[in-house]
Amino acid sequence: MIYTEILRLLLVIAGILAGREIGATISHSAESQIIGLVLGTLVSYVLGGIIARLVDRELQTAMRKLSSVPAGEIFSGSIVGTTGLLVGLVLGIPAIALIHSDIVYPLVAAVAWTLAVFGARIGMIKGRQVIRAAGLAHLLDQKEPLPTGAVLADSSALMDASLEVLGKAGLLADGIIVPSFVMEQVKTLSESPDPVKSRRATQGLKAIDSLRSDGIRVTIVNHILSANRNATEEVMDMAKRLGLRVMTCSSKVAEASSPEKGGTDDKLPEGALPPIVNLTYLEKHLIPDHPPGERLVIDLVDEGRQPRQATGYLDGGELVVVNDASHLIGQKEVPVTVSSTRHTSQGILIFARLAS
């Protein structure tokens, strides 16, 4: 928000100066300069806000596509951010020297500010390489101990709406641990052409930020997925080595272990499977079943898999499939009546028809 407003201010200043100069070029009268100044202010205020928001959104998108890093690597963010600022100023010096106009100064400042912020964000994400290149690899060895009592979350848990609910209910006080390869999986799924997977993955990424803002510790553990193992096997192996419970919505993981099979020591016994926190079980018994005949009001946002179907979502993220409603796609607050429900690995699925 601060970055957006500062960039907008710089662009408005540039617009004011540009309007004054254009007015002076058209006519040397004071009225012409005032009109140019006013028009430059108005145009730059509107365009400056649009440009600043677009640039900030693109920078945030770039951040989400890169890996999260430990706190020790923030050091590199300041280095690369300062470098970006200096590069922006150095690139602007020739423009200032060659173009004798007051407009150049705020434009150069805007470019330098953008490079500084982008450099800081890149530095925080790619800090591991920066630190090693600077000969400060010993900083990477100062690892923080993993929180006792935390749970190890796989990709299905991150993409489930129950995770954020548990956090807000105070049931994740010890925090969660997420392997870096799981984060990469969720980020990849957020760009999937499948709208359901993309929506759930995007919600999962937002849930991580929401948990952190609520004071819940989210620890990203750097771990490379072995070439000959799948993500499920790797998560189970990490849980056994670290003595952690696994939080999941995957039926394969839930079937592979149960709370009675795990140990309670810091390290699990050889060959023992870690205890499982099964969010699907939680949803099945706590989320309302929406019995047939119940009336719901939803926004229809997309087509269903079958002809003439339309789909929408409840506030909790449950998918609602409405038969014979494709002609109403795009309409908001459409009343429907529940026909049946089905529990799936991705949550509850509700089938409905248009309310008479």
Image (cartoon, rainbow, N blue to C red):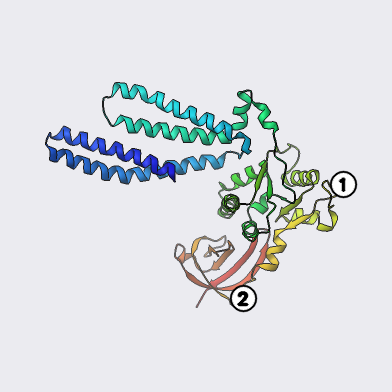
Res 271 label: 1
At x 62% / y 72%, what residue is drawn?
290
Amino acid type indicated by mark 2: Pro
- Classify mark 1: residues with Cα within 10 Å, few (<14), some (14-19) or many (20+): few
Q: Say left or right for 302 vs 42.
A: right
Residue 189 x %, y %: 60, 47
- Classify mark 2: residues with Cα within 10 Å, few (<14), some (14-19) or many (20+): some
At x 75% / y 48%, what residue is drawn?
148
- The image quarter containing residue 185 is top right
Q: Is residue 83 above or below residue 192?
A: above
What residue is pinned by disc 2? 292
Query: Foreground residue, 290 or 29?
Result: 29
Q: Are marks 2 and 1 in contact (CB under 8 Å)?
A: no
Identify the element where label 2 is drawn.
Answer: loop
Q: Earlier in the sequence, mark 2 or mark 1?
A: 1
Q: Say left or right for 45 vs 66.
A: left
Outermost residue on the left side: it is: 29
Amino acid type indicated by mark 1: Gly
Residue 274 x %, y %: 80, 51
Q: Say left or right for 292 vs 115.
A: right
At x 58% / y 55%, what residue is drawn?
196
Residue 110 x %, y %: 38, 34
Query: How far is the residue under mark 2 from the one under mark 1?
Result: 46 Å
At x 45% / y 42%, what residue is drawn?
56
